[in-house]
Amino acid sequence: MSRKVVVLGGGQAGLQTALLLKKLSSSLEVALVERNVRVVYKPLLTWVAVGKTDPENITIDISDVKKAGVKLYPQAVESIDLNNRVVRLSKSELQYDYLVIALGAEPNEEAVKGLKKDNLLAWTLNGALGLREALASGRSRRVVVGAASPPFPCPPAPFELAGLVRKFLGKSLGEKASVKAVTFEEKPLMGLGPEVSSSLVDLLERSGIELLSGFKVVEVDTNAKRVISESGDAIPYDLLSLVPPFKPPKPVTDLEIAGPGGWLVTDPYKGFRTRLGEVFAVGDIALPPFGAPMSGFLGSYMARSAAREILAEAAGVSVDHKERAYAECFVDHEDDGIGIYCDFTDVIYGGGKPHCHIMAHGTLVGEYKAALERSWRKTLRNFIEGA
Ligand SMILES: Cc1cc2nc3c(=O)[nH]c(=O)nc-3n(C[C@H](O)[C@H](O)[C@H](O)COP(=O)(O)OP(=O)(O)OC[C@H]3O[C@@H](n4cnc5c(N)ncnc54)[C@H](O)[C@@H]3O)c2cc1C
């Protein structure tokens, strides 16, 4: 009898897990649950926010996965019953032999007092479009961009947004526009090492962005239009785009396999299984317990690892999972930028540090970023069309 794998979430990690499983084993039954059939390639949300690209260029319709033999359930996951191995969806329910949870993470704007009211968060498609509209209105001269506190997807991305907004406003307002980048860290991206941190500081300076390090946002005073730090410093804004800490989505937080903060705890040596052997977790939902950043590259690597483990078990063999876990991230400021490469293998497998370096500088950084999106689209097409 064929075994049934249910994958929850069709974003970067879940979609790849489902397609890979089906590509490598025709005998497995694979079901994918995703509430939005138009899936977003998130690294280009910053581009949408400044009108550098449009939503249709960063989304893909995943209805086609059925061509690859994956059964799509375009519904919301409402609850997960681990004891009875059942997932309850908005219109049906699914029984599983294996469950792969890839539901990502959600912004928690309530975590910062006053933030939700004025914030234009570009980390979702609607949010990016809202920021784009506000920028295009031409009424904002003093912009504050940054991150309030971890964890959140792609720590370098707020600094990209700062540069793109500076370029955007510079075209119409010149020197009258001011963009401030705030970070809770003593030095930006210091966790990725001194080379990355100092290259980023230099880039921000060249792009005319004022950097406020060690600025831990505790409150947004929406009446006075000021962002307030833990030490009582205040920055005025006309337009605010702050990334709040992210939280796990609701169907996951109360599960017995959730650890501190509601994130799912997994074993990398066992293909990211949770302590319930038949349940796996990949992508953003399972990265915080390792102290690793939420990253699409790491999500893809976890997807490959989980798929291999499920297939190996079905075939009665064992596999060695210790594969290089790396991520790339680009900070594109249009005519300048940096590309960051980090190897997180020691972080994932042993609580060590990441090993990072700058892999690209200058005007080509934006081209690399666009190439990543094309590669994501092509990989999915190849999976679906069986190439
Ligand atoms: C601005 C920005 C720039 C980035 N740049 C980079 C970069 O340069 N490099 C890099 O490696 N990473 C980057 N990332 C991070 C990367 O996009 C994420 O780490 C990646 O998308 C996570 O994949 P995931 O599958 O875990 O989650 P997601 O892609 O968020 O997918 C989760 C899916 O689950 C679905 N879902 C959630 N709840 C439910 C429910 N109840 N029912 C049904 N479906 C549900 C959602 O609709 C979603 O499609 C960036 C992210 C952002 C926001």
Image (cartoon, rainbow, N blue to C red):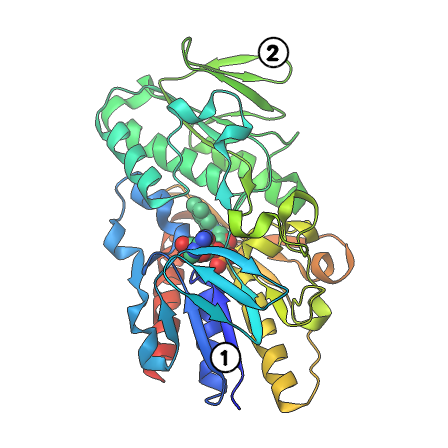
Disc number for residue 232: 2
- The answer to whether residue 196 is seen in the rendering is yes
Marker disc for residue 21: 1
- What residue do we see at 49% from left, 44% from top? 106
Q: Earlier in the sequence, mark 2 or mark 1?
A: 1
Please state if 85 lies on the left or on the right of 354 as rendered.
left
Q: Tag 2, which secondary structure?
A: loop
Residue occupying the point 36% across, 84% down: 386
Foreground tag (2 vs 1): 1
Residue 62 percent location from the top left of the image:
32, 67
* Image quarter in which the C terminus is found: bottom left
The kind of residue tagged 2 is Gly
Whether residue 341 is visible: no
Please tell me how crowded label 1 is: few (under 14), some (14-19), or many (20+) other residues with Cα within 10 Å.
many
Residue 152's x, y, as percent?
A: 54, 43
Q: Are marks 2 and 1 in contact (CB under 8 Å)?
A: no
Q: Nearer the viewer, residue 86 or 201?
A: 86
**Element under disc 1:** helix
